[in-house]
Amino acid sequence: MADGKVVRPDDYLRAFETFVRENPEHIEAIRILLERPADWKTDALKELRAKLAATPQHFTQENLRRAYQHQLADIISIVKHAANHEQPLLSAEERVDRAMQNVFAGQHLSTEQQKWLDLIRRQLVANLAIERADFELLDFERDVETRGWGFWRAIGNDVEQIE
């Protein structure tokens, strides 16, 4: 619904696509997703969700999922797809798996590195963002020997390049 009127899913999605294309200058989170994905942080995700929900059309993840008929699509892929239809609609799990595959394809990882990546994967799937501070807050499994910044010794600083 928009302004109390029933809107067909196709019309709702067209309105959303127009909104995404017209607002990168006004909504920093959209600009980050479309132009500077390496700058994606938890604050950008919060801003994106709040600004989309505050529109008269109530562009919430739930409403957009219903309109796209994709109940697992994450808000990141929804926005990217609205901006460019060549971008697929993905679940958070699919997005994270693709990103990790792109970054670590062909690399041999130690057992410790794989454990860290599994923890990071779960955090990203659940929250769509991860920051350095999260490594101090995450409830790591008992068999991960090093905590917090031990990750950076195990994996290396290049991981910040994951989109």
Image: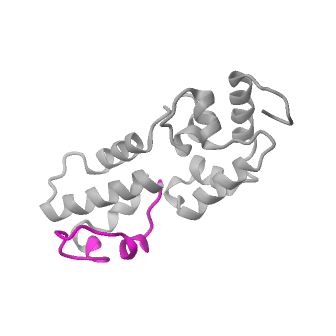
Residue 12, picture quadrant: top right
Asked which quadrant contains residue 58, the reply is top right
Examine the rendered structure and indicate whether residue 87 appears above or below residue 130. above
> Magenta span has 113?
no
Looking at the rendered image, the quarter that the N terminus falls into is: top right
Name the residue rendered at 75%, 41% in the picture: 22
- Residue 4 is situated, as x and y percent measured from the top left of the image, at 85, 34
Query: Which residue lies at the image location 38% right of the left edge and 58% below the top edge?
Result: 123
Residue 92 visible in the picture: yes
Q: Is residue 24 visible?
A: no
- Tell me the residue at 49%/57% (across/down): 38
- Position in image of residue 20 (x %, y %): 69, 41
Q: Position of residue 142 (x, y in %)?
A: 20, 71
Label total for image: 0
Front residue of 115/18: it is 115
Residue range highlighted in magenta: 128-152
Q: Is residue 66 above or below residue 124?
A: above
Dividing the picture into quadrants, the one containing residue 119 is bottom left
Image point 26% across, 56% down: which residue? 118
**102 horizontally vs 73: left or right:** left
Magenta segment, prevailing SS (helix, strand or loop): loop
Q: Which of 115 and 60 is in front in this view?
A: 60
Judged left or right of residue 128, residue 66 is: right
Classify 40 as above or below 10: below
Note whether 91 is above or below 157 in the view shown: above
Percent coordinates x, y for residue 104 in the rendering? 26, 51
Say left or right for 147 vs 5: left
Q: How is the image coloured?
A: one colour
